[in-house]
């Protein structure tokens, strides 16, 4: 009940084209640890806090739809499945809980991590999810077997970022040690390790149709990677403040957005330049996505018309703030860059390298993670 798609609504804009605040509210009885906006609708979000609760919200409305208690330690990570009917939450003690939102109860409890489960991510087809932990392990869980079917080791630091490829064949992990690893789920083994950043990895994104990946880190760089050759395409010039905390490709794949503590940038790569730089007022950015606008891999939420909408959620103590801006109101995005615009170092995008069949490819048993 209450888990429904949001009606299309205008987003107020500052004269400068900056994202505007949609809502700000006290979300928990103590510090908020995590937030996730539903990618299907863009109309719901889930939060976890030090108060050991998981709270469900309608974006733009002040009161929680559900408040779910049952964790025995602070909730460090949350994520909706693709239907927005189930949430997986990871706790500081390493325990994972599956929450059935229709009935407001725990569907199952999973154990296996030795310390905090700090990131969770659903597989594109919903039968699996992955978790990353401060114990440096990445685990893949099968919902039918109700068990961990794969454990990947080798990171030098806490696994803080996870991302499945659009076709579901790979899972990508980024850690506090700065490296990014790609794992082959069908073979159940490491595919490659990218020696990437001089700081903790903060964000990952894969192009919706091309073999192109973006990574961002605390070293204040955004890097592009060719996923056919696993070679770098280039690195962004150092960004102000703490660098980019989140990155996302637009649904049509024409640009990459990078969001930092004080700025939102739009990058293109033919040639590789910064097309857009907008000042922002969000601080501790925790979630960032693009919903609506069609296309694959960018969110594709149930929005009516328009070019899609950027949504961002920031945390400050017990408060969650949500910001929004329509893509078609971000001036300069997708247009020729101005003279003197910042460039990505290195070459442009690799031509002809596209995911076979796009984001909908791989509806076959061969995509299923192998049990190890």
Image: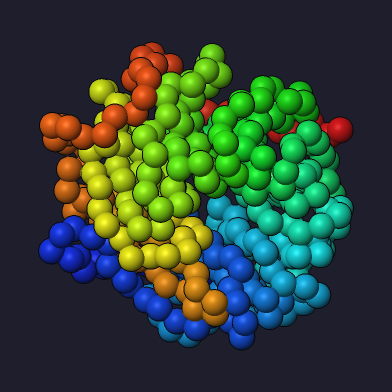
Vertical side of 274 occupied by 68: above or below? below
Is 103 positioned to the left or the right of 250 in the image? right
Is 173 positioned to the left or the right of 64 in the image? right
Residue at image location 75% in from the left, 52% down from the top: 134
Is 15 positioned to the left or the right of 175 in the image? left
Residue at image location 13% in from the left, 32% down from the top: 339
- Image x and y of residue 320, in percent: 47, 74
Q: Nearer the viewer, residue 168 or 159?
A: 159
Residue at image location 46% in from the left, 31% down from the top: 223
- Residue 166 in sight in this render: yes
Q: Nearer the viewer, residue 314 or 96?
A: 314
Vertical side of 1 occupied by 293: above or below? above
Residue at image location 17% in from the left, 48% down from the top: 331
- Image x and y of residue 329, in percent: 19, 53
- Residue 304 in sight in this render: no
Question: In what quadrant of the picture does the N terminus appear?
Answer: bottom right
């Amino acid at each position: 009940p209450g888990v429904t798609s949001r009606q299309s609504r205008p987003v107020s804009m500052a004269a400068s084209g900056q994202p505007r605040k949609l809502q700000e509210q006290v979300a928990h009885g103590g510090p908020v640890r995590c937030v996730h906006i539903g990618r299907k609708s863009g109309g719901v979000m889930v939060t976890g806090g030090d108060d050991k609760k998981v709270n469900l919200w309608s974006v733009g409305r002040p009161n929680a739809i559900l408040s779910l208690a049952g964790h025995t330690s602070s909730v460090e990570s949350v994520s909706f499945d693709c239907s927005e009917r189930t949430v997986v939450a990871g706790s500081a003690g390493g325990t994972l809980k599956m929450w059935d939102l229709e009935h407001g109860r725990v569907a199952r409890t999973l154990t296996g991590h030795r310390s905090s489960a700090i990131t969770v991510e659903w597989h594109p087809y919903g039968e699996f999810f992955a978790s990353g932990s401060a114990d440096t392990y990445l685990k893949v869980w099968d919902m039918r077997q109700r068990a961990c079917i794969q454990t990947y080791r080798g990171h030098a630091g806490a696994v803080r970022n996870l991302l499945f490829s659009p076709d579901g064949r790979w899972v990508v992990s980024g850690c506090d040690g700065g490296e990014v690893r790609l794992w082959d789920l069908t073979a159940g083994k490491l595919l490659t390790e990218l020696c990437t950043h001089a700081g903790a990895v903060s964000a990952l994104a894969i192009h919706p149709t091309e073999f192109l990946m973006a990574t961002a880190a605390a070293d204040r760089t955004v890097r592009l990677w060719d996923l056919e050759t696993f070679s770098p395409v280039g690195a962004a010039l150092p960004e102000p403040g703490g660098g980019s905390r989140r990155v996302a490709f637009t649904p049509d794949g024409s640009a990459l957005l990078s969001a930092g503590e004080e700025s939102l940038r739009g990058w293109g790569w033919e040639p590789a330049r910064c097309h857009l730089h907008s000042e922002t007022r969000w601080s501790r950015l925790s979630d960032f996505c693009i919903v609506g606008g069609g296309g694959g891999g960018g969110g594709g939420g149930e929005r009516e018309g328009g070019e899609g909408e950027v949504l961002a959620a920031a945390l400050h103590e017990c408060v969650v703030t949500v910001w929004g801006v329509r893509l078609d109101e971000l001036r300069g995005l997708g247009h020729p860059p101005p003279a003197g615009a910042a460039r990505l170092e290195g070459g442009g995008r690799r031509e002809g390298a596209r995911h076979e069949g796009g984001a909908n490819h791989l509806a076959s048993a061969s995509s299923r993670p192998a049990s190890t």
